[in-house]
Amino acid sequence: MLKILIPTLFLLPTTWLTSSKWLWPTALTQSMLIALGSITWLNNTTDTGWTALNSYIGTDPLSTPLLVLSCWLLPLMLLASQNHLSSEPINRQRMYITLLATLQLFLILAFGATEMIMFYVMFEATLIPTLLVITRWGNQTERLNAGTYFLFYTLAGSLPLLVALLMLQNNTGTLSLLIIPYAKPLLLMPFGSKIWWAACMIAFLVKMPLYGMHLWLPKAHVEAPVAGSMVLAAVLLKLGGYGMMRLMIVLDPLSKEMVYPFIVLALWGVIMTGSICLRQTDLKSLIAYSSVSHMGLVAGGILIQTPWGFTGALILMIAHGLASSALFCLANTNYERTHSRTMLLARGLQIALPLMTTWWFIASLANLALPPLPNLMGELMILTSLFNWSAWTLILTGIGTLITAAYSLYMFLMSQRGPLPQHMLALPPSYTREHLLMALHLIPLLLIILKPALLWGWFAC
Amino acid sequence: MADYREAPLATRPKTLDPNEYFNLSPDYRRAEAERAALRAGLKRQYQLQLNNPHRKELIEDPALNRWVYARANPYNHFKATKKTSLLGALFGVAPLFILYYVFKTDRVCYGGR
């Protein structure tokens, strides 16, 4: 663990001490080496599952895929940001990289934490670099509004979580993730138990986000610069899912009754946000709502607490992280050329930028869960375990899958096919950097097809 | 007939057509001519920008900007009328209760099948 943490920590002096000519190549190389080093975590050798274990941090098959995803994303974020930051003063560029590296550090500590309070502190800590990135480097005036929504929705949801965790610590004596599965269940008065259950879950449901509490997400995703959108979509949403999966073990007997409203919200949210996607005019907003839709499925899979549900949720989280981040990078390539997110303005790009169309195609296919991509694997496992839970969910998830396919294809056809607008003169051809960025997103996604057992979490058999 | 001269390939609007001309009042004709002059001015601005060899960016369309802003900010002008309340209740509130009832009954009575 230290061989990843120390280099990430020292990315901060690196950015401030390298000369401006070598800033980006150095930061990229260091973060790429950290990412390649983090892949070794996928080798879970111990029988109990907890590898790289010490008093504070450990990795297990649940946290390892998410850790590798967050480490993998840092070089990709740096690659994506290089162009739009090149015109800014050098110290602002250094500040940006510092914020991304700090975020990476907090994310590694959050996913690797064995103590729930450390997870909570890191969960909150990740809000600060993200808020700074959204409000300071966003492009429109709405970025302040977006930052406010983002910060206060998450904070309001997670304050009850702090109280709930402290209550759990008081009663059980420990909050270590290794011990808590074997501790006595928390026995409070009936109504108090329900409030405690809700307090534990609401923070993560707001972060995921669940349909009723999702308003912060389109704002934050749209107003953030590309690296902010990438990390939000790929990793920060998964913090919510990871937290839920960890706490579910503790909340067990209560959950049978309490999950119903949230599963209903999650599944109905899949359909509603999918339908909103079909009506969007803003490309980034479409991708943001599609994130809410996919995370609704993940929330449904986690809340029913079955092995297949958890496995499907974990696979879908990783696959969606890569695919959604890829789509945001593609949307950014459009934005850098037209300086507008309106879909109508950037149509018919297949004629102008045919190689980028390949990446648009693969990313859209990943979004609509085409077999044999892991997106389908995750969705199918969640679908079947939800069907086992109650047969009627199939109607909702089936319609949801249909709508997902519809808006993914709509996004692809709208941006690539059709007539090219007549008044666009200066479309710089696709840079090699952009092709590299897309390849680094989508090749891991394709490679996961070959060994999905890496992502199956605790139930890999 | 005023200072209006139509663009080379455009047709003369109906109200400035000499055959229709004498049916209309002079005020109406003047207003039409002014409006046509404004339109021609806008078209000229667009053509100037379109054919400017030093232009690198997109031509800004204020109508498109207004439309995009309107589509992105519906809640600023939201009003709770009978129709919007009905739609909200039908698609936002009722399905949650219906689905809760369906899932609960299915799992409790039929054991989830």
Image (spheres, coloured by chain):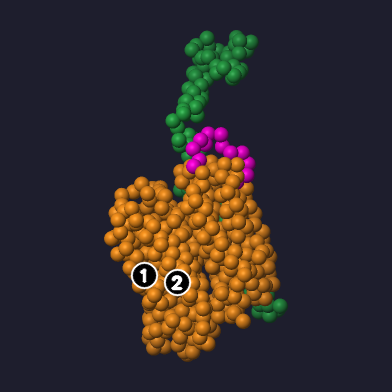
Chain colours: A orange, B green
Rendered residue at 44%/59% (across/down): A77
Can you tell which quarter of the image residue A171 is in? bottom left
- Disc 1: which residue: A7
Q: Is residue B71 above or below residue B24?
A: below
Part of the protein shown in magenta: A416-428
Rendered residue at 58%/49% (across/down): A355
Residue kind at label 1, given as amino acid type: Pro
Residue B16 in the image: x percent, y percent?
A: 58, 14
Determine contact: label 2, label 1, CB under 8 Å: yes
Circle 1: element type = helix
Rendered residue at 59%/19% (across/down): B9
- Disc 2: which residue: A37
Rendered residue at 49%/51% (across/down): A432
Residue A343 in the image: x percent, y percent?
A: 54, 45
Residue A119 in the image: x percent, y percent?
A: 40, 75
Q: Nearer the viewer, residue A318 or A454?
A: A454
Q: Kindly tell me whether residue A60 is visible in this rendering.
A: yes
Q: Is residue B54 magenta?
A: no
User: Do the residues at discs 2 and 1 belong to one chain?
Assistant: yes
Q: Is residue A89 above or below residue A207?
A: above
Q: Nearer the viewer, residue A226 or A169?
A: A226
For mark 2, name the chain.
A
Residue A285 in the image: x percent, y percent?
A: 51, 52
- Most common secondary structure along the magenta stretch: loop
Q: CA distance from mark 2 to mark 1?
A: 10 Å
Circle 2: element type = helix
Locate the C terminus of chain B and report the quarter of the image it occupies: bottom right
